[in-house]
Amino acid sequence: MKILVNGANGQLGQSIIQDWSGLEEISVKGFSRLEWDIANTEQTIHIMNEEKPDVVIHCAAYTKVDEAEGTGGYSSYQVNVEGARNVASACQRVGARMVYVSTDYVFDGNQSSGYTESAPTNPLNWYGQTKRLGELWTLALCKNSVVVRTSWLYGIDGANFVWTMLNLAKKQNMLYVVDDQYGSPTYTRDLGDGLYRLVHTPQVKGIVHMSNVGGCTWYHFAKKIFSFADLEMQVVPVETKEFIRPAQRPINSNLIHSRSGEGIDYLPHWTKGLARFFLDGRERGLLD
Ligand SMILES: NC(=O)C1=CN([C@@H]2O[C@H](COP(=O)(O)OP(=O)(O)OC[C@H]3O[C@@H](n4cnc5c(N)ncnc54)[C@H](O)[C@@H]3O)[C@@H](O)[C@H]2O)C=CC1
């Protein structure tokens, strides 16, 4: 099975390439933005015609949530909507399955019980809107496609909340962290494992929620990070309204995994994902 990964220099893309390279039953090839700009229609068609993959893992995205608001949304629209449309139609043309990675930010977060795959979407910010439009184009243009929604993603290679907390701990011993936004932190390697099972479960189509199970607030996530890192840090819980940011975030973006019985299984609990991150980081000499 031949698999292409776009956005391969991002945190999820790197994690997938590292874990899937060398596996016997698949061949995986990653493309950075410089090698494959998904917003470039001709380049997308050319690469897909040349490579003729069985599967494309679509990791490429404009992910700067606050900047997306500030720039009038142009860059995020180009990548998250037009780029997804290009890839979906090229996948359809060459008969490839497209796995479009999406986000909990397609929901407004007002539903305290969480969101199933079929729950109505209502993004609060421009990033979420562009990702939702990308989902719709993917499902409309590529018959053999799956939209995989995940949340609060962090990996060893990349900028994310975990590294932000660990880097701040080098400079200060007190931090304010939001305690009224709830979600599921998801480790890229655990998501990669879930995507690997999905790739081998061809009958699954449509929308699938895939995040580490369980959930917490950013405050509890930060506390857990410092506990795993064995660092003394005073973490003070604050409300979202005390942190004014350009993009609004959902208060409760808990993703319900109602399709996990279909051969794709649940990912481990989020605290296990974080423990795995620390093991990996220590093994690679990046963490004490
Ligand atoms: N980071 C997070 O907390 C979450 C991310 N997601 C989704 O997961 C997926 C992967 O996210 P991350 O790895 O965290 O993002 P990332 O920002 O680390 O990686 C995205 C990659 O896409 C590339 N890219 C940007 N524009 C491109 C273009 N025009 N053509 C080709 N590549 C382009 C970037 O260079 C980058 O390497 C994205 O679809 C994102 O929307 C979903 C939920 C949470």
Image (spheres, rainbow, N blue to C red):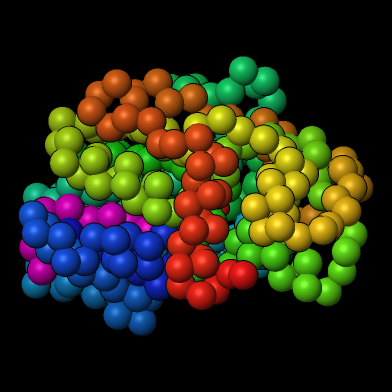
For residue 41, side relative to residue 208 (left or right): left
Task: Tell me, yes or no, whether the highlighted magenta stretch contains residue 56.
Answer: yes
**Residue for point 51% across, 42% down:** 272
Q: Nearer the viewer, residue 258 or 144?
A: 258
**Residue for point 88% across, 53% down:** 234
Q: Position of residue 30 (x, y in %)?
A: 26, 70
Q: Position of residue 107 (x, y in %)?
A: 58, 33
Q: Quadrant of residue 81?
A: bottom left
Can residue 32 be seen here? The reply is yes
Q: In what quadrant of the picture does the C terminus appear?
A: bottom right
Q: Nearer the viewer, residue 154 or 207?
A: 154
Query: In the picture shown, does residue 34 fall above or below 18?
Result: below
Q: Quadrant of residue 188?
A: bottom left
Q: Position of residue 75 (x, y in %)?
A: 53, 67
Which region shows up in magenta?
51-59
Query: In the picture shown, does residue 86 fall above or below 257?
Result: below
Q: Residue furthest top?
A: 113
Q: Nearer the viewer, residue 156 or 121?
A: 156
Query: In the picture shown, does residue 39 fall above or below 267?
Result: below
Q: Position of residue 216 (x, y in %)?
A: 67, 35
Q: In what quadrant of the picture does the N terminus appear?
A: bottom left
For residue 76, side relative to residue 93 (left or right): right
